[in-house]
Image (cartoon, rainbow, N blue to C red):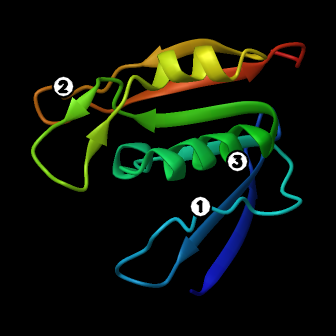
């Protein structure tokens, strides 16, 4: 698997965002955290509902929150159950995060403009005690 990392800054506040991706058509999360990764912001975009195995989901979420020192942005569905495809398992993401990552709080939600087309929304989290 070929991985490439990019770093970018976003103003007015400066965040460092690391994007890791593969150059394959059939990319898969291997369930392993990126060792030593610590950034102000981590982002999960269109990943969570494709993690149908519970262990892979738990490991991914742990790695996502462990890699951030301040903020996490999640773009995902927030409903429970199987919906249409074997490779899609929707979960109560905000409930899971509230129960599992007690030192993180939900700052807000940005609902998508087309709920009739997709169930995904943005969820913004901050680590308790970080500058918000």
- How many residues crowd around disc 3 within 10 Å: few (fewer than 14), some, or many (20 or more)? some
Q: Which mark is residue 44?
A: none
Instruction: Give the quadrant of the C terminus.
Output: top right
2 vs 3, front mark: 3
Q: Which residue is mark 2?
A: 115
Per the model, the C-alpha gap separating discs 2 and 1 is: 30 Å
Q: Are marks 2 and 3 in contact (CB under 8 Å)?
A: no
Of mark 2 and mark 1, the one earlier in the sequence is 1
Total labels drawn? 3
Name the residue carrying label 3: 63
Q: Residues within 10 Å of mark 2 (few under 14, many from 20)?
A: few
On-image quarter of the N terminus:
bottom right
Q: What residue is rendered at 67% in x and 63% in y?
A: 32
Residue under label 1: 31
Q: Give the spatial CA distance, label 1 vs label 3.
A: 9 Å
Q: Is residue 117 left or right of residue 93?
A: left
Q: Is residue 89 left or right of residue 12?
A: left
Quarter of the image where one finds residue 26: bottom left
Residues at badges 2 and 1 in contact (C-beta under 8 Å)? no
x then y, percent, for residue 83: 14, 38
């Amino acid at each position: 698997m070929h991985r490439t990392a990019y770093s970018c800054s976003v103003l007015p506040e400066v965040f460092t965002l690391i994007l890791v991706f593969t150059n394959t058509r059939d990319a898969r999360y291997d369930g392993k955290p990126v060792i030593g990764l610590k950034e102000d912001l981590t982002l999960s975009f269109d990943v969570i509902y494709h993690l149908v195995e519970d262990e892979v989901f738990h490991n991914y979420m742990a790695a996502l929150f462990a890699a951030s020192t301040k903020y996490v942005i999640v773009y995902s569905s927030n409903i429970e159950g199987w919906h249409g495809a074997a490779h899609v398992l929707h979960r109560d993401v905000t409930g899971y995060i509230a129960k599992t990552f007690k030192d993180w709080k939900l700052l807000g939600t940005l609902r998508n403009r087309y709920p009739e087309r997709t169930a995904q929304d943005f969820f913004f989290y901050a680590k308790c005690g970080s500058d918000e």
